[in-house]
Amino acid sequence: MTTTATCSLLRLDQPGVRKRLSAAPVGEYGLLEVAFAWHEHHTRSPKPPTGRREPILTTELEGAAERIVRLLSTVTWATATPIDPAARRPPWIAEQVDVPVQSFHRTTRLLRAEWRTRRRFLTRPATPRAASRAAIALFRMATLLGGFDRPTGGLTVNTGTVEGADTLIEAATLLGIAAERVDRHAGATIVLAESDKVSGLLAASGWSPELAQCG
């Protein structure tokens, strides 16, 4: 691979990038990722409990539900099912994440506690590198849930809550990436305009350290 090819800027719409984000190793902040997803999407389930399983959240974009199910594998037996298979238009793939009824309350209590103490990972980490890894984990999940390329370069990440947006601003600041918050009727959009730093963030989020050096 030539230097030019290796260091070309990554974009979400490039083949395989969302898949790399979804398939990244669980790492030490997997539960933090799920807690972010749960906080952003846990009230949006269109389906009632079936008796044996109960939904905990829904996702709208490719790769998000698949990663959440894998991250929850040490906590409970989660599954993802399409909400409307006929409406699948990648990257728009709406899915519902379900857990067994008997583990629903335990799982949601765990996620609620993780979310309430999220700032400790960014402000009181064991090491500075640990804080960066936590910030990257948050952006990985946020990008899978609501990330889109900007036409002029960089990335926008839609959030459903003010708390989620504020957490991403804090994470971006920690990573040295300029971020602007644009409030919407419901939630906010985080704008990351620096294409080179966004490319490095996508590379690091997809566990590609050789590409992250180019960001």
Image (cartoon, helix red, strand yellow):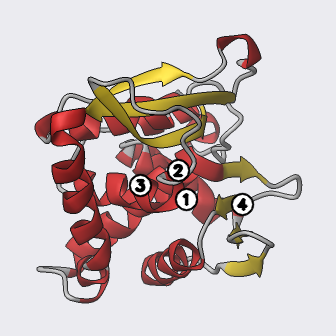
- Looking at the picture, does residue 154 appear above or below residue 8? below
Q: What residue is pinned by disc 4? A: 156
- Looking at the rendered structure, the secondary structure element under dot 1 is loop
Q: Residue furthest bottom?
A: 123
Q: What residue is pinned by disc 2? A: 202
Are the residues flagged by discs 4 and 3 in contact, CB closer than 8 Å?
A: no
Q: Which of marks 3 and 4 precedes in the sequence? A: 3
Q: Residues within 10 Å of mark 4 (few under 14, many from 20)?
A: many
Query: How far apart are labels 2 and 1 at the CA level?
Result: 9 Å
Q: What residue is pinned by disc 3? A: 38
Q: Viewer-nearest of labels 2 and 4?
A: 4
Amino acid carrying mark 3 in the image: Trp
Q: Residues within 10 Å of mark 1 (few under 14, many from 20)?
A: some
Query: How far apart are labels 1 and 4 at the CA level?
Result: 17 Å
Q: Residues within 10 Å of mark 2 (few under 14, many from 20)?
A: many
Q: Viewer-nearest of labels 2 and 3?
A: 3
Q: Viewer-nearest of labels 1 and 4?
A: 4
Q: Residues within 10 Å of mark 3 (few under 14, many from 20)?
A: many
